[in-house]
Image (tube, rainbow, N blue to C red):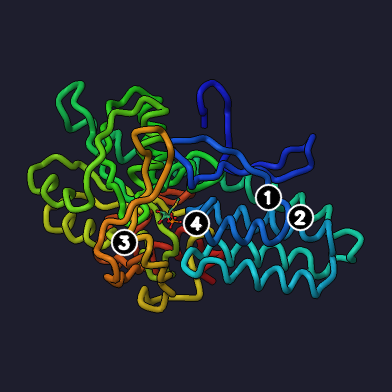
Amino acid sequence: MKVGSANYRSIWHDETKGRVRIIDQRWLPHEFRVVDLISRADFATAIAEMWVRGAPLIGAAAAHAIAEEMKRDPSDANLDSAWEELHATRPTAVNLRWALDEMRTLLRPLPESERATAAHKRALEICDEDVEINRMIGVHGLEIIREIAATKPPGAPVNILTHCNAGWLATVDWGTATSPIYHAHAEGIPVHVWVDETRPRNQGALLTAWEMNSHGIPHHLIVDNAGGHLMQHGQVDVVIVGTDRTTAAGDVCNKIGTYLKALAAADNNVPFYVALPSPTIDWTVRKGHEIPIEERDGREVTHVQGRLADGRVSEVQISPDGTPAGNPAFDVTPARLVTGLITERGICKASPEGLAAMFPERAA
Ligand code: MRU
């Protein structure tokens, strides 16, 4: 996607520097910083502390981390310990385990002398595959927006509510939930996006709003509690969210607060779609409550970060000294509340049968 006039991905390998580079998302939208990730510790910190975040991007970063490790030490012991350390960084997004498994399964049978080259190639492929998966999610999701647009008076926008940031910053490019929006906008379909702020870390306010601004997509930032009211008043045509892990039965784990939006959508007959890349499906889990939910530092709840009047980015405390905070980072929306899953192969029901029909080779 473009930042100013330059094309960016959220992670890339700079061939001239021989380094993996990322957009450090902690500073957006106030500062655009690019940093190099070199050591295993750099990658682990970047994932755990959310310099990079979003399920597909976490997976891509982990793949690059293994590739860089293999240049340093291609032994089995190092491969295994890198797998373990990276896997422990964030527990919920299954793309992390998926990417680490992809790398280890490929590398394990190879002689050590071939591992660095093979790992580098596969990490780049994983990134390219993510871009193509998300592009196709956009192509299929566009159909939903097109159909809604056809029911509206000419020129009236399709109002789409989204939660968290499932945009290009959460993936390598395009985003998942945002890809249909970018495709519709490019096709000239009027769209308007309700951007949930997404407390506690405000990925909607900071990142999705920045993406919408950068691409000239009409949008309003809303507090997390506004969605239900807007739905009651006919101001939301469709909800599209991302996911960090979806079970083989179609239960959807996503950023905390998604479930409440799904409940409100069901109560108001608003279609609720989930943009789901296939590496985000956990075929080993059927019930949503089996998904590990990341519990993050309470400081994310008691404090907020923003830009001060003098331009500095800083943090302020919003609760009394000593008030403890609970901070579950994700929740699970049961399959019955999901209208459909938008995958790279098409749209399917959020059910074991729907997913198995779409990905028969994986379901088996
Ligand atoms: O905690 P985060 O910012 O990594 O959470 C991100 C989300 O919950 C996204 O909605 C999800 O990863 C889908 S991203 C395409």
Residue at 80%, 60% (x, y): give it: 70
Q: Which residue is mark 3?
A: 302
Residue 97 vs residue 53, the one in the foreground: 53
Helix, strand or loop at mark 4: helix
Q: Which residue is mark 4?
A: 55
Quadrant assignment, res 292: bottom left
Q: Amino acid at mark 3?
A: Thr
Residues under numbered marks 2 and 1 in contact, where contact means CB atoms less than 8 Å apart: yes
Q: Which residue is mark 1?
A: 37
Ligand 1 quadrant in view: bottom left
Sequence-first tag of 3 and 2: 2
Quadrant assignment, res 218: top left
How far across and down, in percent of the image, does residue 234 sit?
Answer: 10, 42
115 left or right, relative to 349:
right
Q: Which mark is residue 210?
A: none
Sequence-first tag of 2 and 1: 1
Helix, strand or loop at mark 2: helix
Furthest-left residue in view?
Answer: 233
Sequence-first tag of 4 and 1: 1
Sequence-first tag of 1 and 3: 1
Crowding near the residue tagged with mark 4, few <14, some 14–19, many ≥20 C-alpha atoms within 10 Å = many
